[in-house]
Amino acid sequence: MNEINRRGFIKGLIGATSLVALDSLLQGCEVQPSYVDNVTFPAQKHPGYYENNNNSLADGKVASIQESVELIRVDSIYQKYVEDKPTCEVKKLRWHGSGTVVTQDQMYYYVLTAGHVALAEKERKDIFGNTYKLARQRIHLPYKNVNLELLAGELNDNLDFAYLRCPRVDNLKVMNAKIGDSDKLMVNDMVYAFGYPLSTGNSVTSGIVSCTYHKEPEKKKTKAKVHNEQFLFSSPISPGNSGGPVFAIQKGELYLVGVAVASYVYGQNMNIAIKINDILRKIR
């Protein structure tokens, strides 16, 4: 069997983020923001168990959550380096993902997304081996015309998340749901995945928890890794869904239990989410 291509942070997976080249230099780009202390995040609730059907889901809950899910756009400029010296040649990249407005305070809205959406690589190489380093970057909500500032984030084999904030604006809405306990998820629990697949529009798909952890495919002479910070779910997702929220149901209420980050290339709805509990341990 041919080896599955690597895309993003998990070997054998493709990150659910769309990527296109820009035609002109970016306008209003900002330097990659630094981390900020004293991060705000909503209180976590522990519903005790989740449900494997949606019969008790209150009308309008899904539509209400959709209003808090936003398209995130990242515009980046990479500058070519030759023998560690910058040149005038640059490459322009743009990619999209999804994010959730999870809470607010008197000054800011706070947005949760995937790490590979907001955390750009500091250095890239083209097919000829040329080195390009990140020069400028702008993370923003294009439909709301507001920039995002990075507060915290992590991108490795186990975790893939970013927590951002933006100034308060009139046309953003905070999610009408509580933070769940992802450690209590069980196989066959009903889940909903929200996001902007292929950057086309705000959508929602339903499915189930297919595994409460993620085990990488077996390979010759390599022991398969098990990632307990992640779970598998069957709700269909596409490039652009990265960073979108995954919700479970308990007594007619929706609870945020994860962030969608990737999907297997050769699988049928074999999708991966980062558990919200493990994200909270890093943010708080």
Image (cartoon, rainbow, N blue to C red):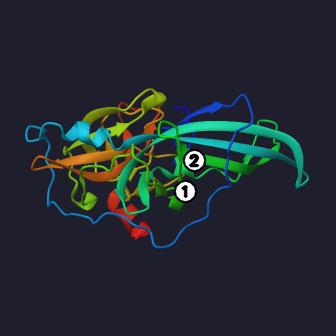
Residue drawn at x 72%, y 46% as measured from the top left: 124
Q: Are marks 1 and 2 in contact (CB under 8 Å)?
A: yes
Identify the image quadrant of the C terminus: bottom left
Q: Is residue 190 left or right of residue 140?
A: left
Q: Is residue 44 left or right of residue 74?
A: left
| Residue 218 spot, x, y in % from top left | 45, 46
Residue named by callout 2 = 139
Residue drawn at x 58%, y 53% as measured from the top left: 119
Q: Is residue 62 visible?
A: yes
Residue drawn at x 66%, y 48% as measured from the top left: 137
Q: Is residue 129 above or below residue 151?
A: above
Q: Is residue 239 above or below residue 256?
A: above
Q: Which corner quadrant of the image does residue 185 belong to?
A: bottom left
**Closer to us: 232 or 226:** 232
Q: Residues within 10 Å of mark 1 (few under 14, many from 20)?
A: many
Q: Residue 28's mark?
A: none
